[in-house]
Amino acid sequence: MLLDKIFSNQEGSASRNFMISALWWSIFAMGAGLFAGMEFSVPDLVHNVPQLSMPHLRMWHVNGVAIGWLSMGYVGSMFYMVPNLAKTKLWSERLGNMTMWAWNLLMVGAFCTLLNGATEGREYAELGAVLDVFALLALFCISANVYMTIVHRRVKKLYVSLWYFLGALFWFPLVYLIGQRTFVQLPGLNDAIIGWFYGHNILGMWFTTVGVGMMYYLLPRTTGNPLYSHGLSMLGFWGIALFYAPTGTHHILQSPVPEWLKAIAVISSIFLLVPVFTVLTNFFMTMKGKWHLMITDMPTRFTVTSCLFYLVTCTQGPFQATRWINWYLHFSQWVVGHAHLALLGTFSFILSASIYYGLPRVTGREWYSQGLIRAHWWLKFLGFLLMMTSLTIAGLVQAAGWAFGIPVDQWSLTIRPYWFLRAISGVMIVLGQLFFAYNAYKTLYTPAKLEVKTKEAGVTA
Amino acid sequence: MYRAGALGVLITFFLIIWATVLMPMVLFNPKPSGHGNNYAVSNKEVADPARGRQVYVREGCFYCHTQFTRLQDRGYGPLVKAGDYVFETPHQLGTARTGPDLTNEGGKYPAQWQKAHLINPRAVKPGSIMPSFSFLSDRDMNDLVAYVQSLGNERKVTAYVEAPAEYMQGTIPKTVDTNSDAAANAGRGLYIQDCAACHGMEGLGNGPNAISLEKKPANFTRPFYKQYSDEFWYYRVTEGVPGTRMPRWGDGGNLNDPRGGILTPEQRWYLVAYLKTLSKDRTSEDTVDKLDQLNSVGIERLPVITKEQWEPHSGEE
C-alpha cells in the first residue's frame, strides 16, 4: 500500500511530483545564490562556517538551480506535455515516480557534498563520481519513459516540441557522460576543452532545447492561435542541433587552446543567430492578435517574457563570443549577468509558465491565488532587471579596469553599489519564488472547496 | 521521414563530438614546457603544494581567481604557454576575476602575508571582499599557502607589471635623466606641491587628505614598487587611477604635447625620478618568507608583517 503511494501509478502523478520537487529545491538553490550575493557586500556575514562560505554556496547554487530546479521542472513538464502531444498516457508512471525519488536523492547528495566542498573542481560538473552515475541512470530512465511514450503514441505526426524533447533526451545523457570526465584524467587544457563542451551544452542541448520545446507547446495553447509556421520551426530545430554543440570553446577564447577550435566556436556562435531568430520570428508571429493576453493570462505573460529574454540572451551571446568583444568583456560580471539572463530570465520564466499552465491540468485544481502569481511575476521580472543591470554595469567597470591594467583592489570599491543592488535583486527573486511555492502548496494541499472558484479568463482546460 | 530525422540527429551530434571533443584530444598534445608550476620544490614535511592544490579546488578559489594570463593583462607577469598546463587536472583556468589572476602569484608576497590574508583578507587589504578562510585546519592552510607560493615558480617572474605599448620604452621621448639626483630633487619639489597632500611627505600614503578618501592613496615605500619601470611610473602618473581620487596628471590623448595635461611631460618625468627613490628594499627582519615559519602565524596572532611594508594602500601609519 505504502509502496503504491510512493511509487504511485496514478495518471499525472510523476509530472506533479517532479514539479513540486523542482519548487522545493528552487527555494534552497536560489536562497543560496542570494546568500552568496550578500557575501559580496558583507564578506564577513558569517565567519568560520565552511558550509556557508561563498564558493561552497556558489557550487550548490549553480547545481541546485540547474539540476534541481530547472532539470526537475523540465522533466515534470515533459511528463505532461509529451503524453498530451502523443494523445496517450505516460508509458510508466511508476518508473516516472521512481526516477523522481532517485533524482531527489541525488539532490540531497548534492546538497550535502557540495556545501562541504566535496567537488570535482570542474565548473558545472562539480558532482562527485557516485552522484554522476546516479544522475546518468536517472536520465536514462527518463529518456526511456519518454521514448516509450512516443512509441505508443496515437497520432501520426510529431509536433515540433516533441522533436526538441526527443533530441534533448538523446543528447543530454551523452553530453553528461562526456562532460563529467569522472573516470578519466586528461591533461589540463584538454580537460578545459571538454569541460566547456559540457558547460555550454548543458545549456544548448538541454536547457535550450527543452525550453524552446516548451515555448512551442505553450504559446499556441495559451493563445489559441495555431503555430505560425512548421517550416520555420524545423529550420530552427536543425539550426540549434548543428550550431549549438560546437560553441563551448568560446568560454576559453583567450587561453592557449588550439586556434582552429576557437575559430569553430566563434563561427558557430555567430551562426546561432540564425536558428534563434527563426525560432523567435515563429513565436512572435504566433502571438499575432493575442498580445493582450499578456495582461490577463499569467502563463502567457510568463511565456512571452521568457521569449523576450531569450531574444536578448541570444543576441548578447554571439556578440560576446566574437574575439574583440570577448577580449574586453571576459572574466567580468557582465558574463555572470548573461548567465542569469539565460537561466533565470529565459528558462526559469518558461518553466514557471509551464508549471502555472500544467499543474492545474495535471491535478485538476485551480491555482489558489491569481494575485500571488502576479506578485511572483512582478517580483521576478523587476528583480531580474535590477540584477541584470547591476551586473552589467559592474562588468563594464571591471572590464575597463582589466583593459587599463589597473589592479583589482584599486577599482573594486567602485563596484560596491552594484554588489549591493545585486543582493537586493536577489531578495526580490527569492521572495517571488517563495510566493510561487506557497501558492503551489496551498493549491495542492487545501481541501477541494477552493476548486469551485470561478475560472480566470484564458485558463480553459 | 522520422527515421531520416533520427538519423540526422545522430549524425550531426556525432559529427560535432568528433570535431570538438575527439579531434582536440588527438591533435592537441602540448609537451610539458617546464615553464609552469613545480610542486616538488618545498619540503613536504612542512607543507605540500600538491595537496594544497586539492584544498584550492575544494575551497573553490577558482570561482573568483583565474589562472591564465592574457596578452592584454599588464599586471600579472609573463604570458602562459599551452605546455604549462599538462599536469594541471582538474584545470583551474577559471571564468571570473572577482579577485586578481593568480597565475604568477608565487613569491609575490611573503608566505606569512598569504596566510594572514587567507585568515582575514581585510586585515591586510582593507576593503577586500575575499571571503575569510579561517576555518581551514593548520595543515590545509599551510599546504594551500605552499601551493599559492608555487604558482608560476618556473616562470621566473621578475616583474608583474608592464606599461601599455604606447608608453613602452622608446615610444615616448624621455626628456629627463631619471637616474640623476638633480631630477629627483626637482621631482621632490613638485611632489611636495602636488602630491604630498594625499600621498604624504614621506610617500607613505598618509597625507592629510587621505583621511577623507575611501580608496587610500598609494604607499610608495612598499618594496613592490621596486619592479616599476620608469615608463610604468610615467604611465601611472600620466593616466591617474580611474575609480579613485588620483588625478590624471597628463593628457593621455596627446602624450607629447608640451601643454597637455595639468603637468607637462617634463614635470612628470621629474616626478618619476623622485618616486622611484622612495620604495624600500625588502628586508628580512620585517618579513618571514620561509614556509616552515608559517606555523607561527595564527588566527589569534596575525603575523608581524609591518603594515608599512605589506599593506599596499593604507593611509594609516
Image (tube, coloured by chain):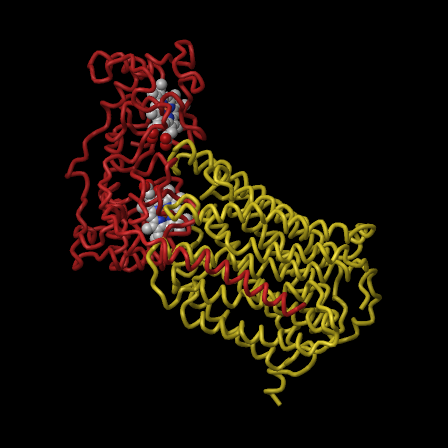
Chain colours: A yellow, B red
Residue at screen point 45% across, 44% down: A331
Residue A166: x, y in percent?
62, 68
Q: Give the left or right position of residue A51, taking residue A213 as reference.
A: left
Marks counted in the figure total: 0
Say if B210 sits above or below A348 in the image.
Answer: above
Q: Give the left or right position of residue A437, taking residue A227 as reference.
A: left
Residue at screen point 45% across, 64% down: A178
Q: Is residue A65 visible?
A: no
Residue B299: x, y in percent?
28, 52
Quadrant in the picture for the N terminus of chain A: bottom right
Where is residue B142, by image quadrant?
bottom left
Residue at screen point 15% across, 39% down: B284
Residue at screen point 51% across, 41% down: A322
Camera-side residue of A313 and A333: A313
Residue B10: x, y in percent?
55, 65
Q: Is residue A89 visible?
A: yes
Camera-side residue of A442 and A285: A285
Q: Residue furthest bottom?
A: A1
Camera-side residue of A383 and A401: A401
Residue B43: x, y in percent?
16, 55
Quadrant in the picture for the C terminus of chain A: bottom right
Q: Give the left or right position of residue B230, taking residue A297 as reference.
A: left
